[in-house]
Image (cartoon, rainbow, N blue to C red):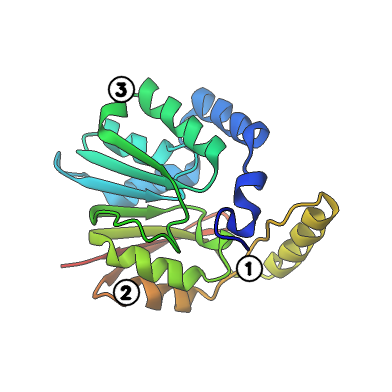
């Protein structure tokens, strides 16, 4: 793990994989998990600010801006993902309201602004210290935090082991992590948030935490 590319994320989520994901989004729009996250958030006021941590191609955050949210901050370690996110924001006509940063939010000293909505979709599974990442993200949430995590299904440890073997064979440093859902929820609510809802979409659990 190094400061510039922890867990080999920039190398793992490189141009070939990212372009495939971008083509899929352009053909079909949000996937089922992402649509469920948007539904979990519900209607957003026009002045709503969004912080999309581990934004990927930016599909979720851009969708919220296109639906009327005010401004968005997008953070990702993958330079290929950020380039794709710029394209997605420009195509949706929201580039002027989207600030993008290549950074490791978990360890960054950058003073990111707090936001009304904080998103972490397919992010905690990429970090060995997923709970610490969530706790920091929760401190940046003024109203709502939504995150996804791999559910502790019986076959997930086997999947993780096979993933690790495949990464070693390909010379990749990336590893996939499974975290205790209760520990994640404790971290997400440590700053005064209240657990509002949990939903299941395939192997993923989706959690919404809100502050009153």
Q: Image quadrant for the C terminus?
A: bottom left
Q: Residues within 10 Å of mark 2 (few under 14, many from 20)?
A: some
Depth check: give the residue in front, 33 or 149: 149
- Residue 162, compared with residue 121, is above or below; it is below
Quarter occupied by residue 189? bottom left
Say whether disc 1 or disc 3 marks the residue closer to the N-terminus: 3
Between marks 1 and 3, how big is the CA–CA gap?
40 Å
At horizontal 35% and vertical 24% (from top left) the residue drawn is: 92
Question: Which mark is nearer the camera, 1 or 2?
Answer: 2
Q: Residues within 10 Å of mark 1 (few under 14, many from 20)?
A: few
Q: Residue tagged by mark 2?
A: 189
Quarter occupied by residue 152? bottom right
Query: Which mark, residue 153?
Result: 1
At horizontal 20% and vertical 44% (from top left) the residue drawn is: 44
SS for tag 1? loop
Say whether disc 2 or disc 3 marks the residue closer to the N-terminus: 3
At horizontal 37% and vertical 28% (from top left) the residue drawn is: 89
Q: Residues within 10 Å of mark 3 (few under 14, many from 20)?
A: few
- Residue 56, compared with residue 145, is above or below; it is above
SS for tag 3? loop
Q: Position of residue 100 (x, y in %)?
A: 38, 39
Q: Residue tagged by mark 3?
A: 93
Q: Is residue 21 left or right of residue 189?
A: right
Q: Position of residue 198 (x, y in %)?
A: 39, 64
- Residue 164, compared with residue 180, is above or below; it is above
SS for tag 2? helix
Query: Which mark, residue 188?
Result: none
Q: Image quadrant for the N terminus?
A: bottom right
């Amino acid at each position: 793990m190094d400061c510039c590319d922890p867990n080999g994320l920039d190398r793992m989520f490189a141009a070939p994989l990212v372009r495939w994901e971008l083509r899929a989004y352009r053909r079909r729009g949000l996937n089922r998990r992402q649509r469920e996250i948007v539904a979990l958030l519900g209607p957003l006021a026009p002045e709503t600010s969004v912080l999309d941590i581990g934004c990927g191609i930016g599909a979720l955050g851009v969708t919220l801006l296109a639906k009327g949210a005010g401004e968005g901050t997008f953070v990702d370690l993958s330079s290929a993902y950020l380039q794709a996110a710029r394209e997605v924001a420009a195509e949706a006509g929201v580039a002027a309201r989207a600030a993008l940063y290549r950074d490791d939010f978990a360890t960054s000293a950058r003073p990111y602004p707090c936001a009304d909505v904080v998103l972490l979709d397919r992010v905690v599974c990429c970090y060995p210290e997923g709970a610490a990442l969530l706790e920091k993200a929760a401190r940046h949430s003024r109203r709502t935090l939504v995150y996804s995590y791999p559910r502790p299904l019986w076959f997930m440890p086997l999947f993780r082991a096979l993933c690790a073997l495949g990464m070693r064979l390909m010379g990749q440093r990336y590893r996939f992590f499974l975290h205790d859902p209760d520990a994640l929820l404790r971290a997400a609510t440590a700053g005064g948030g209240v657990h509002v809802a949990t939903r299941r979409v395939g192997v993923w659990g989706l959690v919404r935490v809100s502050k009153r």
